Amino acid sequence: MTGNELAELLEPALGRMGYELADLEVRLGGDGGLVRVFIDKPDGIDLHDCEKVSLAVSALLDVEDPVPGKYDLEVSSPGLDRKLTKIEHFQRFMGEIVKVQMRFPIAGRRRFRGKLVSLDDENIVVEVDGEPYSLALATIDTARLVPGEG
């Protein structure tokens, strides 16, 4: 099962519990793997939330058995320097400072750090030193929030 397929399995269950699946990391192979689930909700995440979601996700994974072999399950908040993986994340953090790494160079560079100034269904615009750069969502390798600089 791919990470996207696992996300499709987990998102509805987490949504019913009042949580957003902010990100998912899956590493399998060797003697054991790792399934790391990052959750969020409007008023933030605490240890109780992580425990509650860990129990629910563990039960769901035991029943559905989508992950082959042995693995550890971790549930965490996305943190202050959270990854931006969905268009809703970019919408929520409009006006904040972000770090974006592209898969391919744009205007001779792959890394951009600046203010997230706009977006549409296909692109975000990041203003770096007063210069706007339009970056295609489909070619973003990683995008992260820069805490405390928005």
Image (cartoon, grey):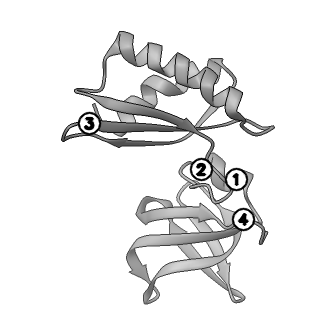
Q: In the rendered structure, which disc, 1 or 3, sits on the residue that comes first in sequence?
A: 3
Mark 1 surroundings: few (<14), some (14-19) or many (≥20) residues within 10 A? some
Q: Amino acid at mark 1?
A: Gln
Q: What residue is at 69 percent from the left and 89 percent from the top?
A: 129
Q: In the rendered structure, which disc, 4 or 2, sits on the residue that comes first in sequence?
A: 2
As drawn, the label of residue 87 is 2
Nearest to viewer (mark 4 / mark 3): 3
Task: Please tell me how many numbered marks the rendered image carries.
Answer: 4
Q: Amino acid at mark 3?
A: Gly
Q: Secondary structure at mark 1?
A: helix
Residue labelled with disc 1: 91
Measured Cα–Cα span from mark 4 to mark 2: 19 Å
Q: Is residue 46 above or below residue 127?
A: above
Measured Cα–Cα span from mark 1 to mark 4: 16 Å
Q: Is residue 131 above or below residue 148?
A: below
Q: Quadrant of the N terminus?
A: top left
Q: Secondary structure at mark 3?
A: loop
As drawn, the label of residue 147 is 4
Q: Are marks 1 and 2 in contact (CB under 8 Å)?
A: yes
